[in-house]
Image: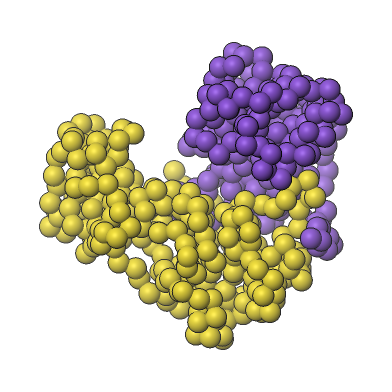
Chain colours: A yellow, B purple
């Protein structure tokens, strides 16, 4: 077992929590599970054992491998899985153009899952979604999403022209507080430092998130989160407490 | 010059951008500025020179000190400043109970500035806001905020009882989509992993942010961002584009 490489056809979940998410949602992709000799103390381990038994997945105890793949320590379980992306399904899309930050990518995935957005489109060049740092930041949300990479935005657009398109841009034409839809839509966001180029003003209805002049722009994952919160509000308006402890 | 310690009465801005923010907003606190010998290439440097000249601040060229304080490289300017907190001023408050993550803290500061919230209350134990990691994540927003630490939430509450209080909790009584105020208020958020304890249900009107059951909770900085976006919407509803390039 070696450290992660983009060219590998497998990747890792580092930690008990993302490994459980992997086993629950993508058991068919799991090659094996590696645990630390002191994993017994972790209260998530019985569930890992149960899921591995059910799916005939081998559990390997190896402190050396754990240390090699997660040198920082504090990792008790690792799932080794085949990198398979699920194709886009019916529903709204989030399109990220040239996203480069792994932490942002993970946070965006978790937030998408939180607001019921399951389809993620990524325009290359872009971060590798299977990097263990993305998976960790997503807290396993990645396994619930349908993800497709495109080389070119125009190709994606031609295929999904029947969607309403909302590019989020500092120069956007409409204030987000005055824009709303429940029709099938794609929300488009640019790169962390440069945003979307001006040509995106021509796709659908461009939108800006108003903020004070004291900051240059919002953080990308924050901009995505605010937009999903806004566009999904009718769905959540009448929800009561979702989870009783 | 040694690495940052919480017990020091001074701290550092690492990088040209936060150093400019420091010089613009808190020149009286700056002890000196240290630059790398190749800083001349950086387009922000003339502004640093101008601000230092105006405020009689000494610029020291020392690659060794830069490397010592920011070993990762890619840092061309460091501001050394006295740690002074500005007291709370008139306006709404954000209260964070036991925040522990430096990146989250910085992102929250930047988002507060973006939505016009200038007063930050922190209940101890908590992260040190002057840690250079927080300052960097805030992109200098920290210098625009008024910040007070309290040992105990009740002490803070007694002093600001005239505010409306909204603790954000998974068990909150009201859906945020159905709550709104423009009266003087305090928005209260708990720790990254544990949230607010049940006793906070007794302070003011508790609120929850509805999300799908597929995630346990939103990231803290995301929860704060969504809440500020929601509570400040009347202020921003009619804004047009804020910044023309």
A93 up-or-down from B58: above or below = below
Q: Seen in the image, is B18 located left or right of residue B211?
A: right
At horizontal 73% and vertical 39% (from top left) the residue drawn is B45
Quarter where residue A14 is shown: top left
User: Nearest the camera: B117 or A201?
Assistant: A201
- Foreground of the two, B3 or A219: B3
- Quadrant location of the C terminus of chain B in the rendered image: bottom right
Q: Residue shown at 65%/48% (left/top)?
A: B225
Give coordinates of residue A101: x percent, y percent.
50, 52
| Number of on-image labels | 0
Residue B153 in sight from this viewpoint: no
**Looking at the rendering, which quadrant does residue B23 occupy?**
top right
* Left or right: where B60 falls relative to A140: right
> Would residue B177 be visible to someone looking at this image?
yes
The structure residue drawn at horizontal position 44% and vertical position 43%, both measured from the top left corner, is A245
Q: In which quarter of the image is the N terminus of chain B?
A: top right
Image x and y of residue B228, in percent:
70, 48
| Position of residue B131 in the picture relative to residue A18 (left or right) | right
Residue at the (30%, 39%) spot, across then down: A70
Where is residue B179 drawn, in percent x and y? 71, 52
Does residue A235 sit above or below A23 in this rendering? below
């Amino acid at each position: 077992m070696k450290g992660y490489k983009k060219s590998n056809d497998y990747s890792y979940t580092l930690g008990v929590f993302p490994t459980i998410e992997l086993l629950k949602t993508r058991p068919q992709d799991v090659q094996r599970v590696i645990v630390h000799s002191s994993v017994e103390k972790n209260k998530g381990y019985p569930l890992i054992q149960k899921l591995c038994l059910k799916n005939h997945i081998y559990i390997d105890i190896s402190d050396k491998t754990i240390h090699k793949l997660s040198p920082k320590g504090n990792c008790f379980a690792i799932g080794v899985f085949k990198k398979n992306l699920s194709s886009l399904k019916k529903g709204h899309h989030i399109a990220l153009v040239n996203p480069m930050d792994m932490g942002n990518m993970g946070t965006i995935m978790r937030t998408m899952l939180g607001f019921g957005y399951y389809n993620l489109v990524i325009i290359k060049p872009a971060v590798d979604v299977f990097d263990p740092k993305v998976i960790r930041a997503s807290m396993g949300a990645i396994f619930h999403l349908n993800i497709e990479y495109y080389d070119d935005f125009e190709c994606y657009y031609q295929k999904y022209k029947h969607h309403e398109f909302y590019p989020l841009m500092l120069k956007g034409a409409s204030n987000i507080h005055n824009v709303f839809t429940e029709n099938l839509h794609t929300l488009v966001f640019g790169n962390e430092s440069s945003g979307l180029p001006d040509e995106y003003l021509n796709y659908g209805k461009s939108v800006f998130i108003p903020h004070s002049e004291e900051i240059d722009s919002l953080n990308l994952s924050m901009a995505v989160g605010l937009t999903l919160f806004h566009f999904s509000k009718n769905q959540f308006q009448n929800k009561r407490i979702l989870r009783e402890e």
